[in-house]
Image: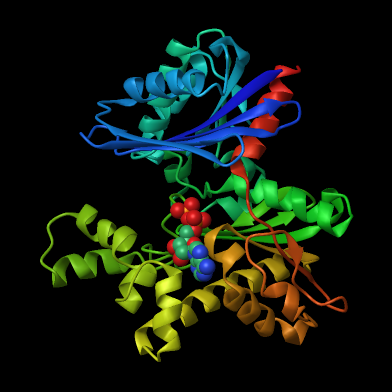
Amino acid sequence: MRKIIVINSGSSSLKFKLFESPSKNVLASGLIERIGLDDSIITIKYGDKKKHREVQAIKDHTVAVDLLLQLLKKLDIVTDLNEISAVGHRVVAGGEYFKKSVPVDGNVIKKIEDIIELAPLHNPANLVGIKVFKKLLPNALSVVAFDTAFHQTLPEENFMYSTPYDWYKEYGVRRYGAHGISHRYVSLRAAELMGKPVEDLKLVTCHLGAGASITAVKNGKSFDTSMGFTPLTGIQMATRSGDVDVSLVAYMMKKLKVKSVSEILYMLNKESGFLGVSGVSLDMRDVEAAAAKNNKRAELAIKLFYNDIVKYIGQYYMEMKGIDGIVFTAGIGENSPETREAIMNELSFLGVTIDKEENTKRGTEGIVSGKDSSITVMRIPTDEEYMICCDVEALMNK
Ligand code: ADP
C-alpha cells in the first residue's frame, strides 16, 4: 500500500498528515512545535485513538523531520520509509508562476525563491521543509501545492488594482488571494452536497478562521476573493484589520511618532481585528462570551465581522449575477452557529431561510439553510491536507 505524507511547514513548526493511497485513510497526523527551542514538542495521533507526545530539544527542521520519520517507524505506523511514495508540501505564495500543484524540480525551487518577497515569513519555511524531505526521502515524489494557485483564474478586472500599470508589470503588484486550497476543497464538497456539478454553480465560500477570506467561486473557478496582495486585507480577522485606507499608515506613523512603516504594518497584522477592536481576545469564543455579558467593544467587533462578511457576499452576488450556495468553513465557520445564523438573517430578504436545528451542530458537514431557502447554505469542515493528497495522487498516476 502506498503512503503519502502531506506537510505544512512553518518557521518554528511542522504539521503533517500521513495518508494511505488510494483509500486516503489517515494513518497518522501530528505537529512538531517550538522548533529551535530546548523544549520542542512533538505530538503524533495514530491508530485507534493512540497518541504519542514527547518534549525534547529540536534544533532545526532537519532534526525535526529526521525525528518524525524515525518515530513513524518506531510507532509501527510504517515498516519501511520507502513505503512513503510521495510528499506533498503546502506553500503559501506561488505568485503568477503556479496555477496548480506541480512536482518539485530545481526550476520550481528557484521560482519559489524568486517570489519570497510575496510571503517573507512563510515561503522560506516552506522551502526548508521541501529541501529537508528531499534529502531524507530521496526516492519519494515531491509535490508543491500553493495557497494562491486556485485564485489564478481571477479575471483581470478582479485581480488588478488601479495603481500605476508598471507596478503590476515590473513588480507583480496585484491581488493574489490566499486559502485557495481550502476554498477549492469546500467548493467541491458543496457541489457534492448540492448534488450538482461544480461547473454549474455560483458559490461563495467563507473561510473564517484566525485568518479569514471569502471567495466567489463561479463554475468551479475562483472568480474573486477578499484577500489581496497579502493576507492582510478583506474581512476583519483575529488580529488583522482587513480592508483599511492605506493613507492611515502615514497618518498613524506621525501620530504615534513611529519611524518605520513596518511598525504600523505590524499593528495592522497583529494588534487589530477582533483583538484590537474588542480589547478582549483574538479568539472568537472569548469575544462571543464577552459580548454575551454586554461588553460593548466585543459586540462592536462581532458587528464589524458580520458586516464585512455580508458586504463581500453582496458584492459577489452582484458580480456573479446571483448565488446558488454559500459555504461556512474553518474554525469560526464550522463552529459558530451564531455567526452562520446572523449572516443568514441578514440575507433573509433574498429568501434565505434557516434550518435552526441543523445550524446548531458544529464541526460536521450539513446544510444549515431551510428546504425552501433561495440559497443553499452549508457548514463544511475544510480539509486542506486531503485536497493536497488528491493532487499528489493525480501527479503520481500521471
Ligand atoms: P487558523 O486560521 O489558525 O487555521 P482555525 O481555522 O483553526 O484557524 O480557526 C481558529 C478560530 O476559530 C479561533 O480564533 C476561534 O475564534 C474560532 N473558533 C474555534 N472554535 C470555535 C467555537 N466553538 N465558537 C466560535 N469560534 C470558534
- Mark count: 0
Across and down, in percent, residue 187 comes to 72, 52
- Measuring from the top left, give residue 65's x and y in whole percent: 40, 23
Q: Is residue 212 above or below residue 59?
A: below
From the viewer's perspective, tell me whether residue 395 is left or right of residue 275: right
Q: Nearer the viewer, residue 212 or 380?
A: 380
In the rendered structure, the answer to whether residue 120 lies left or right of residue 75 reads left
Q: Quadrant of the N terminus?
A: top right
Q: Does residue 293 sit above or below 38 in this rendering? A: below
Q: Name the residue at the bottom extreme.
A: 294
In this picture the colour scheme is: rainbow
Residue furthest to the top in view is: 139
Residue at image location 81% in from the left, 65% down from the top: 324
**Residue shown at 60%/43% (left/top)?**
384
Coordinates of residue 274 in the picture (x, y in percent): 39, 71
Is 365 left, or right, of 285 in this rendering? right
Q: Which of the 4 image quadrants contains residue 376?
A: bottom right
Residue 106 can be seen in this image: yes
**Image quarter (top left, top right, bottom left or bottom right) of the C terminus:** top right
